[in-house]
Image (spheres, helix red, strand yellow):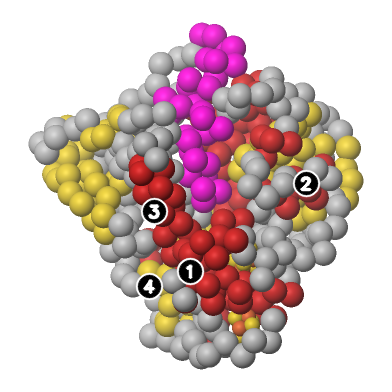
């Protein structure tokens, strides 16, 4: 066991974290809803293909969507009941996604994965893939693929930073399920054949730091409270001193970063034979009557979640899926809990940016704290001019979409949306170019 302070990183921002609303609230199990709407695209990569039809009876834990292709993930039913529809629903990003709708029969009948008999790395990775586990910190990259790098890695880093304001689900899990997280970490290290394990925890979580310090084979690194400490590249630097160059990935410096919730999913899939059917999310904001940390069945409607938390105030001006910095603003609550959901925020005027953007005043504040050392104003001007390749030249592809620049902008420019849009355009241009060249 060792405990040490992490390296300092001079950029990033300090935000009002609002964690006090839920940090002392134990995770509650939300009762299963009457109906679930389960998306086939809860991960990066190809959507899962529905393997059930309207009228089929299913049990909790039964496969309803089969992974399709090298980067994809299985999807399982979160309730027992009857499939009543398979339909397209538009998500918070405006993309149409196939959903399987299941009416809950209230019997809670459950099926499990087969008991494992061999625990070689390949068996562990196969189980993690079978159970539909993806990066639950928000990225949604299939974990089995992440655990199959082409070169041998030498350090596993667990992300206990949870630097997004308001969110406390990782923190509560670290307090309430410490040993389950540890078992998930050990299986993940076995799958990667790695001995060196670091867990990075922000200094504002002393109880979590104390609990993980009890494990002799974990190296606990206390991180400065700073946003976006949870970004993979910054976490790797602050815990190991290794710098991931622009355009490179953590595996290029021998590291694999995993999230707290993902470690619990790994433990449950291997020791309890349970596939991924639920998520833990923080429901918070001054606009929600009873803020909570909640375990919810995948496919539960955000409307049901808000209602379970006592409803929203009349002064609510903004709803956000995720945290306020990297989450997505919702135009309606007709959205459904997904594997990667960690937060649902109900914000009132004094805690949300709802001001209309005004013209850029060239103050340069957006560049002051960009953790990737970009100059956001230059990128935005290129995007507004429709010059996406210039935006690329200015480094938009290295942008984390962390929102630090927009947070600092006095003109309230929608910088992150602009950068996200530019990335999509650049991908389109590159695809067309490679098709023209017959690649
Ligand atoms: S902070 Fe906002 S107003 Fe200032 S230069 Fe950047 S984009 Fe323009
Ligand atoms: S340019 Fe990207 S990485 Fe830099 S502060 Fe803005 S959102 Fe974050």
- 437 horizontally vs 219: left or right: left
Expressed as whole percent of the image width and height from the top left, the position of residue 223 reads 80, 54
Q: What residue sits right under mark 4 in the picture?
A: 311
Expressed as whole percent of the image width and height from the top left, the position of residue 248 reads 65, 43
Q: What residue sits right under mark 3 in the picture?
A: 428
Q: What residue sits right under mark 1 in the picture?
A: 387
Task: Report helix, strand or loop for mark 1.
Answer: loop
- Nearest to viewer (mark 2 / mark 1): 1
What is the residue that sits farthest to the left in this orientation?
55
Tell me which label, 1 or 4, sits earlier in the chain.
Answer: 4
Expressed as whole percent of the image width and height from the top left, the position of residue 115 reads 45, 15
- The CA span between labels 2 and 3 is 29 Å
Q: Magenta segment, which residues?
A: 117-146
Residue shown at 73% from the left, 32% from the top = 254
Q: Is 272 in front, or is 259?
A: 259
What is the residue that sits farthest to the top in this orientation?
117
- The CA span between labels 4 and 3 is 41 Å
Residue shown at 82% from the left, 64% from the top = 10
Tell me which label, 4 or 2, sits earlier in the chain.
Answer: 2
Task: Report helix, strand or loop for mark 3.
Answer: helix
Tell me which label, 1 or 3, sits earlier in the chain.
Answer: 1
């Amino acid at each position: 066991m060792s405990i040490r302070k992490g390296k300092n990183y001079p950029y990033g921002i300090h935000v009002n974290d609002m964690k006090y609303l839920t940090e002392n609230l134990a995770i509650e199990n939300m009762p299963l809803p009457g109906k679930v709407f389960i998306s086939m695209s809860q991960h990066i990569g190809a959507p899962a293909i529905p393997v059930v039809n309207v009228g089929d009876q299913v049990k909790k834990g039964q496969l309803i969507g089969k992974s399709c292709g090298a980067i994809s993930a299985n999807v399982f039913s979160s309730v027992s009941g009857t499939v009543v529809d398979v339909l397209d629903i538009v998500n918070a990003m405006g993309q149409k996604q196939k959903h399987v709708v299941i009416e809950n029969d209230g019997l809670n009948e459950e099926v499990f994965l087969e008991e494992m008999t061999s625990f070689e790395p390949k068996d562990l990775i196969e189980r993690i893939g079978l159970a539909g586990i993806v990066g639950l910190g928000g990225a949604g990259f299939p974990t089995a693929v992440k655990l199959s790098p082409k070169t041998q890695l030498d350090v596993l880093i667990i992300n206990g930073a949870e630097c997004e304001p308001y969110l406390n689900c990782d923190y509560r899990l670290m307090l309430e399920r410490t040993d389950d997280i540890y078992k998930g970490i050990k299986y993940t290290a076995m799958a990667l054949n790695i001995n060196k394990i670091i867990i990075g925890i922000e200094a504002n979580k002393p109880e979590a730091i104390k609990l993980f310090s009890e494990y002799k084979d974990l190296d606990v690194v206390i991180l400065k409270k700073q946003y976006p400490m949870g970004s993979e590249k910054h976490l790797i630097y602050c815990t190991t001193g290794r710098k991931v160059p622009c355009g490179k990935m953590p595996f290029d410096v021998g590291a694999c970063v995993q999230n707290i919730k993902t470690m619990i999913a790994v433990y449950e899939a291997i020791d309890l034979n349970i596939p991924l059917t639920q998520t833990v999310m923080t429901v918070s904001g001054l606009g929600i009557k009873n803020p909570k940390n909640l375990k919810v069945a995948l496919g539960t409607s955000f409307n049901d979640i808000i209602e379970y938390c006592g409803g929203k105030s009349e002064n609510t001006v903004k709803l956000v899926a995720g945290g306020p910095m990297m989450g997505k603003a919702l135009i309606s609550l007709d959205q459904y809990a997904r594997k990667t959901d960690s937060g649902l925020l109900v914000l009132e005027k004094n805690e949300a940016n709802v001001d209309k953007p005004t013209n850029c005043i060239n103050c340069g504040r957006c560049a002051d704290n960009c953790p990737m050392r970009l100059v956001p104003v230059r990128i935005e001007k290129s995007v507004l001019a429709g010059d996406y390749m210039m935006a690329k030249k200015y480094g938009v592809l290295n942008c984390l979409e962390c929102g630090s620049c927009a947070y600092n902008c006095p003109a309230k420019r929608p910088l992150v949306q602009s950068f996200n849009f530019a990335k999509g355009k650049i991908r389109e241009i590159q695809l067309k170019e490679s098709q023209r060249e017959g690649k």
